[in-house]
Image (spheres, rainbow, N blue to C red):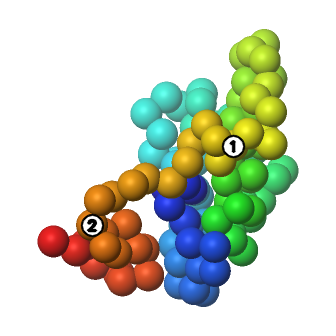
Amino acid sequence: MAAQFPDRPSRQQQKDARTLLELMTRIYPCAECAAHFKDVVRSMPPEVSSGGALRQWMCRAHNAVNRSLDKPAFNCAYVDARWGALDCGEELACDLSLGKPRR
């Protein structure tokens, strides 16, 4: 989701992204993981002002989880290289601003 998030999201897209991340704190299948993610979101509110901001936030959130699991942190400078946007193969197929899937 973060890889495809627009560089200039609408207010609705920003709201939707925040809502999705908030929902993950309640519906994540692992209760312990959901509680930890809730703490992460509470201490570090999601940044949804742009695609780049959201990708960096997701990386920092990922690293917060890695720290709790004694795993190495990922260098967030490489987020776009590691998790780049999808190449959908069709014009506008991945464009989130359309509000509905393209065929």
Q: Disc 1 designates what residue?
A: 79
Q: In x, y percent, where is residue 79?
A: 69, 43
Residue, far left:
103
Tell me if I can see residue 37 in this picture. no
Q: In x, y percent, where is residue 60?
A: 78, 42
- At label 2, the amino acid type is Glu
Residue, far bottom:
11
Q: Residues within 10 Å of mark 1 (few under 14, many from 20)?
A: some
Q: What's the residue at 84%, 50% (across, down)?
A: 43
The one nearer the camera, 24 or 71, is 71
SS of the residue under disc 1: helix
- The vertical placement of 83 against 41, above or below, is above
Q: What's the residue at 22%, 74% (across, down)?
A: 102
- Is 38 situated left or right of 67 in this image? left
The CA span between labels 2 and 1 is 24 Å
Q: Point out the tag, 2 or 1, that comes first from the N-terminus.
A: 1
- At label 1, the amino acid type is Val
Q: Residues within 10 Å of mark 2 (few under 14, many from 20)?
A: few
Q: Disc 2 designates what residue?
A: 90
Tell me if I can see residue 86 in this picture. yes
Q: What's the residue at 42%, 74% (across, down)?
A: 96
Mark 2 or mark 1: which is in front?
2
The one nearer the camera, 84 or 61, is 84
Displayed quadrant of residue 47 = bottom right
Residue, far right:
43
